[in-house]
Image: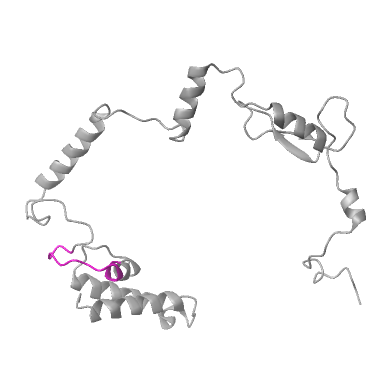
Amino acid sequence: MKLDSKYFDKIRVKPSAEKKAAETVPQCDWPDCPRPGRHKAPMGRGHEGKFYNYCTQHVQEYNKSYNYFAGMKDDEMAEFQKDARLGHRPTWKLGQNSNANVSGMRRKAAHMRDDPFGLNGGGAKEPGRHPSGRALRSTELKALQTLGLDDAATAEQVKTQYKTLVKRLHPDANGGSRANEDTLKAVIQAYDHLRSSGFC
């Protein structure tokens, strides 16, 4: 029996004591310490993601005296902690960054004004509601997404999209390949659901 076969390469076994001993462990970073540094300790503020390697005795000593805020004034430390609550992201007081809000409202108003046929019903369509005014169930929305349509799709668009997808995904159109079989099943189920719910 051949033990260096490719079939044995993927078998996981507990490493032997010799192999563990052969693994390299860095020396303790404490000055003049010859022991192995098996424990990581953070280098501190400004060196995030970098670590010292210490032996058990020295990592305990280091942890007792470690202070992330060492060298910071009280007001700097308070400001840092306040920013940390928001993930150090910028924030604005109410009404300060109003330019973004005003321009957003102007864009929305322009969108309503550029609707000469009143397709938006005099305003933006509510999400989850069909242009006909019919409220859509979450299962209907999911079925529409499966067909690649949004919640504004008409019954005629659903039928057309269904026929197109079935022709494109059917094995006969792909040289007998069944690679799209799961997608085809999902499309058929989505269409059947929309039909049975009275959408189309």
> Which residue is at a point 90% across and 49% down the rendered structure image?
22
> Which residue is at a point 15% across and 62% down the rendered structure image?
131
Residue 23 x, y percent position in the rendering = 86, 48
What range of the chain is rendered magenta? Answer: 130-141
Magenta stretch, main secondary structure class: loop
Query: Is 92 positioned to the left or the right of 58 in the image?
Result: left
Direction front: furthest residue: 64
Taking the magenta stretch, the answer to whether it contains residue 132 is yes
Residue 42 x, y percent position in the rendering = 68, 33
Q: Quadrant of the C terminus?
A: bottom left
Q: Is residue 163 visible?
A: no
Q: Please name whichever residue, 158 or 102, is drawn nearer the observer in this view of the structure.
A: 102
Note whether 168 is above or below 55 in the view shown.
Answer: below
Note whether 33 is above or below 156 in the view shown.
Answer: above
Note whether 117 is above or below 90 in the view shown.
Answer: below
Find residue 1 and report its image quarter: bottom right
> Which residue is at a point 71% across and 34% down the rendered structure image?
41
> Which residue is at a point 18% across and 56% down the rendered structure image?
126
Taking the magenta stretch, the answer to whether it contains residue 118 is no
Q: Please name whichever residue, 181 or 57, is drawn nearer the observer in this view of the structure.
A: 57
